[in-house]
Amino acid sequence: MKPDPLLKTTSPLRPLPNLIFMSRWLQLPLYLGLIAAQAVYVVHFLLELWHLIEAAAGSQAALQQLISSIGYKVTTPVVSLNETIIMLVVLALIDVVMISNLLIMVIVGGYETFVSRMGLQGHPDQPEWLSHVNASVLKVKLATAIIGISSIHLLKTFINADNYSDRVLIAQTVIHITFLLSALAIAYTDKVMSGIAERKH
């Protein structure tokens, strides 16, 4: 039986290229650190949710904790939950979830792209986007996630607009538009580069 010419035998790397290639594992502590940050976000989410439940049950201490955490300021003391406070707290919780999603994309996608394959092919819980992830796709997805997070922050600011100056409102709006234009530029650049690569093949 003749050996398949398409199957290439891999030769061991020389010492210096092997050292350079192995240096990718230096990123591992960074991803482990992001996992620890994810755990901190989970604790923060549960604490904020618990304060919301306690405030709904009538706890003044929990209500004041929520008001302080969301930066809600009023001229008269707040004695019970109102729709604005609930909305701001819920948006803060959504913000935590979206940042956690961003962390997952960076941890899983970055590890898969830059460190080592996870071997998740065929796994029932494999993320759909991970099957075709590369550095360009990861950048577009991260930019899109950042726009979502910025949108939540901007909505929180507009709901609580009385506590912000016009300068802050305009600055946050300009920053959000900048994020949006940056994401469009990244996506367009990726599309152009993909088209060039396809034409070369």
Image (spheres, rainbow, N blue to C red):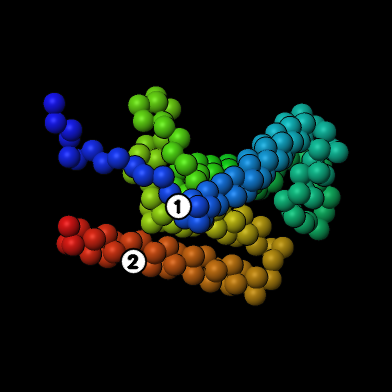
Of all residues, the one furthest to the right in this rendering is 61
For the N terminus, the quadrant is top left
Question: Dot 2: what SS?
Answer: helix
Of all residues, the one furthest to the left in this rendering is 1
Q: Which mark is residue 189?
A: 2
The mark that comes first in sequence, 2 or 1, is 1
- Image position of 6 (left or right of 48): left
- Image position of 201 (left or right of 193): left
Spot occupied by residue 15 in the image (x, y as percentages of width and height)? 50, 52
**Observer-nearest of 105 and 94:** 105
Q: Which mark is residue 14?
A: 1
**Observer-nearest of 83 and 148:** 148
Spot occupied by residue 76 in the image (x, y as percentages of width and height)? 82, 54
Residue 83's image quarter? top right
Residue 183's image quarter? bottom left
Q: Amino acid at mark 1?
A: Arg
Q: Amino acid at mark 2?
A: Thr
For label 2, the crowd category at 10 Å Cα-Cα, with few meaning under 14, some 14 to 19 and many 20 or more, is some
Spot occupied by residue 201 in the image (x, y as percentages of width and height)? 17, 57
Residue 66's image quarter? top right
Question: Dot 1: what SS?
Answer: loop
